Amino acid sequence: MHAEPAYLFRHALIRDAAYQLQLPGDRARLHALALHAIEGLFGGRPASPPALESMATDPIERHPTDLLAEELASHAWVAGAASGEPEMRAVHELYLRRGAEVADLLYRFEASIESWKRLAAIASGVERGAALRRAALASHARGRYTESEPLLAEALRIFREFRHRRLEGVALKDLAGSVRESGDYARAERLCEEALAIHRELGDRDAEGLALRNLAILYKEELRHGDAEKACLESIRIQQETRNPRYEALALKSLANVLADSGRRNEAESIYARALAAARASRNRPHEGAILGHLANLLVATGRFASAERLFEDALAIMREVGDRRFEGVVLGNLANCLAQQGRRDPAERLYMEALAIHREVGNAASEGHTLSLLGMLYRRTSRFEEAEATLKDALAIHRRYRNGPMLGLTLDSLGSVYFDTGRLDSCEKAYLESLAICRESRNVRGEGNVLGNLAQLHARRGSHEEAEAAHRAALQVLRTVSDDAKLGRHLCEFARYLVERGRFEEAAPIWSEGATIEGRSGGSADFEALCDGVRQALLSAGRPMFEGLER
């Protein structure tokens, strides 16, 4: 060992030995002296924030000692809080609380979780429940849902024990959010409705607006778009009435998501712009990043891939800045989907893998299942059928466990297509029919249309042309009811190809023209280019003139 490190090591060892030789009372006085000296250098002791159970929403007023809050809490603990000395116990709680609040403000969620848990360990009654709730919220913000749910359940038990109805309603709302993220939509809806009833009973308008927005998210996941839109509009009205731009941004984002999901994309885009303005007005970086991510998804759906990529990168930068691992994983998966739709499959696969790693790290099972489904589809498009089948089956297990009907139907449809590609037509039919039943049961009209189109191709391959044509026409009829340009355009072109292969060129031409026009509006994709090549080849083989737009 070199001389200087050896000296420093001996110095540290002797210093620690000297410290340990102090009598407990002397040691406590040393820490009290250090506490008072630091406070004197940093502007004195800060004021106590409002009681946790008051549910004050304004950020705490910053103080120079906030930089050293954790250290000051440790000094107060040894100076007397550990032995129950009242003054030092109060000082210890003060700095633990301020350290937790500041960690939340700076998005240092790991430090926040630890501080709130330590505060809960020494608090009692409703204050203990409130500290546990804040630890749960920090866990949720970090994406650690498996940890946030039991913390919220314990907080809820405490609020009920002490008959604190307002905090009971708030905890129910928060618990519904954590349960929803784990994919258990039915239980989440029950919890949300309980919370909403309490907020209305107490006349708590802000909390009522938030509960309505949470309920709208659940309705959207269950494809109850009318109910979701109504709940969003009511939530927005409440937040405008209470002049709360932070919560208004959330409700506007949810409304835009509902509109985008139901095919009303122009309306959705303008609402996203309003949501973004409200998030920036309230200086809420996590919400700003989330809105950018959702707007990017809308641009992907309308074929504006370059603009979407830029927004995804902006959203990722914000999520990494604020430490939101959960939404970072979601955005990575959506960016991967954007690249996959452009045929950039290698970088898409890498991003899917990154997203999966994050989903598993934070316990976001619903997004893990979603990403596995998309990755399985990518494997299928690259003819890696064994990997596609295994990945889709892994996704199915997650969707079944959480009763996620829309994703279950989509994944069964994709698995059926793998069976179709590998010639296992009986297994293909079984998967398609199960998918169709689930889509109808969960009112997934888009999924129903997609499966009907795939069934049409299965019937055609078996030579059952009456059934094939009927399924094609049923798919188009269903898709026209949901204003889904992307899927409608694709199925029009698929039907036109079927008619071309049957030699019905005059019927095929206008159907192809309509479908290609819709695809053009949506920006097209690598899959559409492959479809064009197939129709081109069929027309050339038959000696027929090219349809409009197919000329090279």
Image: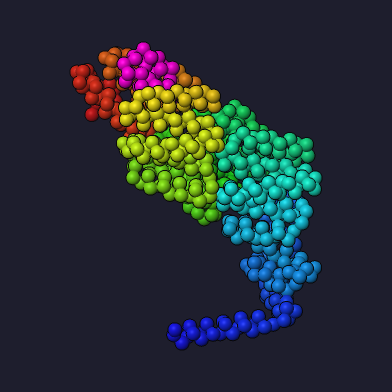
The residue positioned 50% from the left and 51% from the top of the image is: 361
The residue positioned 43% from the left and 34% from the top of the image is: 302
The residue positioned 29% from the left and 27% from the top of the image is: 532
> Does residue 199 appear left or right of residue 513 in this picture?
right
Which quarter of the image is occupied by the C terminus? top left
Is-magenta flag for residue 265? no
136 or 238, nearer to the observer? 136
Is-magenta flag for residue 464? yes
234 or 190, nearer to the observer? 190
Percent of width and height locating residue 508: 32, 17
Q: Is residue 155 visible?
A: yes
Q: Considering only vertical position in the picture, is 438 above or below 287?
A: above
Q: Main secondary structure of the magenta part?
A: helix
What segment is highlighted magenta in the picture? 450-475
Q: Considering only vertical position in the picture, is 508 above or below 321?
A: above
391 or 510, nearer to the observer? 391
Q: Quadrant of residue 194?
A: top right
Percent of width and height locating residue 190: 67, 34
